[in-house]
Amino acid sequence: MRKTPEIPSASMADIAFMLLIFFITATSMDVDSGLERVLPQMPPENQKQDDTPPIKERNVFSVLLDANNRLMVEGELIRIENLKEKTKEFLTNPNNSENLPETKETEIPILGSVEVTKGVISLRNDQGTQYGMYLHVQNELVAAINELRNELATTKFNKIYANCTGEQQDAIREAIPSRISEAEPKTIGGKK
């Protein structure tokens, strides 16, 4: 009687062990979270450091995160869920309110005459603020700007901002600029 050949299995355990180690290390790696920002160009060396005109108080949207991760906007405690809508209201100034930012009528290629806000978002956080909360606030601020850009793109070009041509995106960015000023963290209040 003829014996059936066996499949050699001596190295199977080694292969299974190496696959197990690979999948454990590959799936447990932490993904760094961060912010993608395009930094402004360096000013020319001969330019004075203080030649920028002062910004009027009404043109500044003050966002403050304390060490207890409480969010204050314009001196008022708010929930983070409301930050995007408050930011959109600030940037658009729909009722031409005296306490919201000024706008400047600007002629933009492709778009024509557009009211461009002079508003600047000023973000400051405490040294004890949790990084996750800081990122959440950043995401809400950027989401507000992105929603406004999508609304303008849909109105003018009948498509969302991401689907616009490069020239259309440039025009929309000029009409709805992203001006977020971040101050260095300091001890503001709350726990240490």
Image (cartoon, rainbow, N blue to C red):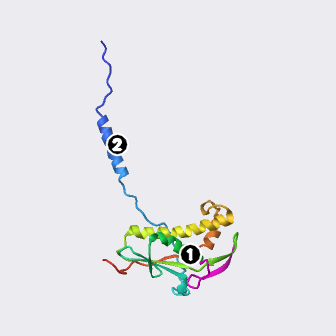
Magenta stretch bounds: 93-108
104 within the magenta span: yes
* Whether residue 90 is visible: yes
Query: Could you say which quadrant of the image residue 104 lies in?
Result: bottom right
Query: Could you say which quadrant of the image residue 4 lies in?
Result: top left
Pick out the residue farthest to the top: 1
Q: Position of residue 53 (x, y in %)?
A: 56, 87
What residue is at 61 percent from the left and 70 percent from the top?
173
Image quadrant where one finds the N terminus: top left
Q: Nearer the viewer, residue 167 or 132?
A: 132
Label 1 secondary element: helix
What residue is at 55 percent from the left and 82 percent from the top?
59
Q: Which mark is residue 19?
A: 2
**Do tag 2 and tag 1 residues touch (Cβ < 8 Å)?**
no
Q: Main secondary structure of the magenta part?
A: loop
What crowding class fits label 2: few (fewer than 14 Cα within 10 Å), some (14-19), or many (20 or more)? Answer: few
Q: Position of residue 77 (x, y in %)?
A: 43, 78
Q: Nearer the viewer, residue 174 or 77?
A: 77
* 3D distance between C-alphas at marks 2 and 1: 53 Å
Vertical position of residue 98 compared to residue 173: above or below: below
Q: Which mark is residue 89?
A: 1
